[in-house]
Image (cartoon, rainbow, N blue to C red):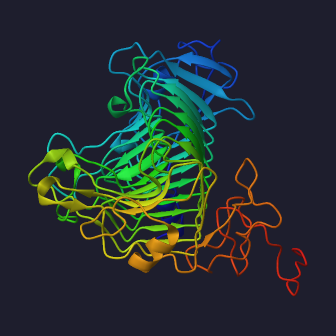
Amino acid sequence: MPRILILLLALVSLPAAATEWFVAPGGSDSASGTFAAPFKTVRHVLDMTSAGDVITLRAGTYNECDVRLRKPLTLRSYASERAHIHCNITVNNSVTIQIDTSASGSVLRQLEISGGMYYGIQLQTDWYPDPCCATKSGPSNILLEDLKIHDTGRDGIKITPKSNHVTIRNNEIWKTGAAEAPGTPLDNRNADGIDSVNVSNLVIEDNYIHDISTTGLYFKGGSSDVLVQRNRIENTGMSGILVGFDTSVEFFDLTINPQFYESIRGTVRNNIIRNTVYEGIGLYSAKDAVVVNNTIIDTAQLGHAAIYFGVPAQDWDPIAGRPPSINPLIRNNLVQQYGGNCVEIRHWNEFGGVSGLIGNPNTDFNLFTNSNGACVFRDARPGSPISAGGTLAQWRAYEAADLHSIYAPAGIDTSGQLLVGSAAIDAGTTLTQVTDDFDKQQRYPPYDIGADELNAPPPNQIFLGNFD
């Protein structure tokens, strides 16, 4: 084949260069969409894009609902600016930004997003209306980064089944539940920071989630291999982080999860959770969960416990499994309570008796303290001598757990960082699942308990710098 023909064929096979489109509040939808002549509305430019294009928004507010990505795109603000997309929560059935399955590979970056009767951001799925099998899909390989999401009608971010390999990084999410009627009872609220159902390989890291109507974040419905790390979650109307929770049966993929586990191999590490009405970290039908080096402060104010093994109802469906959590690894967590229980295993008499955990809680090398009385440890399973609550010593004796844990003042500041002299310093165990801390600083054995590592590098380790 002639060399010139080979070269031409190679050039034909190359993808076309991505186009960058510009939008500004002072622009015009009859313009060309260039930097000098930007469009006015985001929804207008979406109809003109090709897969891989970039939409760059200039600063200002875009009062638009249902901005919907139907192909892989990057939607971002210009340079150091932050554009604001707002959807009035009174717009019926509205979502501010939606991402379809066909938009897998999309990126949202450096935006302010508010409103939506339902959600600030929703990842759509083709799970409906026939949730039959693992071949169903949602938008995958999505990056949500450096976003400010607030005053949403319900959840800040809603992730629907089979939306896999999604990363949610370095965002601030606050004031969910704006569409809820004032005074809505806790049990009737439904407005989480991040709500994810039946997903895999979700990463939630380095976010600040606060002043949330219900739960900071959860992953449930058979979600697998989820990683939640280095998040600060505070001031929630219900819970902090839930590993599994309570899902209706139609959202499970029973071809790969016939037992109805709510979470499989979820990891929660190096998070700081403060001021929650119910549990700081809850495990519901969680299989092989890893909960390590978290700092949990003033949680379970009305019920449950800082670390809680709960029981899902799974919509009270007679075919649901409602399995107990099994094989957890719970290490190096710092629990500072102000009256709420420290650890609890729930048991229901419903459905012939359902427990929150089967086997040993596998809790150890944790630090517990309670500034308003003694820490309460409760195992409500049949036959337990501490079904009404007991001390750490009683918990150890019955569960054979927390044998290396300590009961001492936490020694932390108001942000959850360790103070010099804290009993948590060097009191943890070295874990392969943890290499850094909340501040992304490397940990050195022996690990400190909690999300923060105060220790300096060992004296024989000298950083010489990076030489070219």
Q: Nearer the viewer, residue 248 or 64?
A: 248
Q: Position of residue 256 (x, y in %)?
A: 22, 66
In terms of image quadrants, where is residue 446? bottom right
- Left or right of 382: which side holds 111? right
Q: Nearer the viewer, residue 165 or 179?
A: 179
Q: Position of residue 196 (x, y in %)?
A: 38, 47
In terms of image quadrants, where is residue 335? bottom right
Q: Which residue is depicted at the point 53% across and 18% down?
A: 41
**Quadrant (top left/top right/bottom left/bottom right) for the C terminus:** bottom right
- Left or right of 67: which side holds 127? left
- Left or right of 316: which side holds 312? right
Q: Position of residue 58 (x, y in %)?
A: 67, 24
Q: Is residue 123 above or below residue 350?
A: above
In terms of image quadrants, where is residue 22? top right
Q: Which residue is depicted at the point 25% across and 43% down?
A: 126
Q: Which residue is depicted at the point 82% across and 77% down?
A: 457
Q: Position of residue 449 (x, y in %)?
A: 65, 69
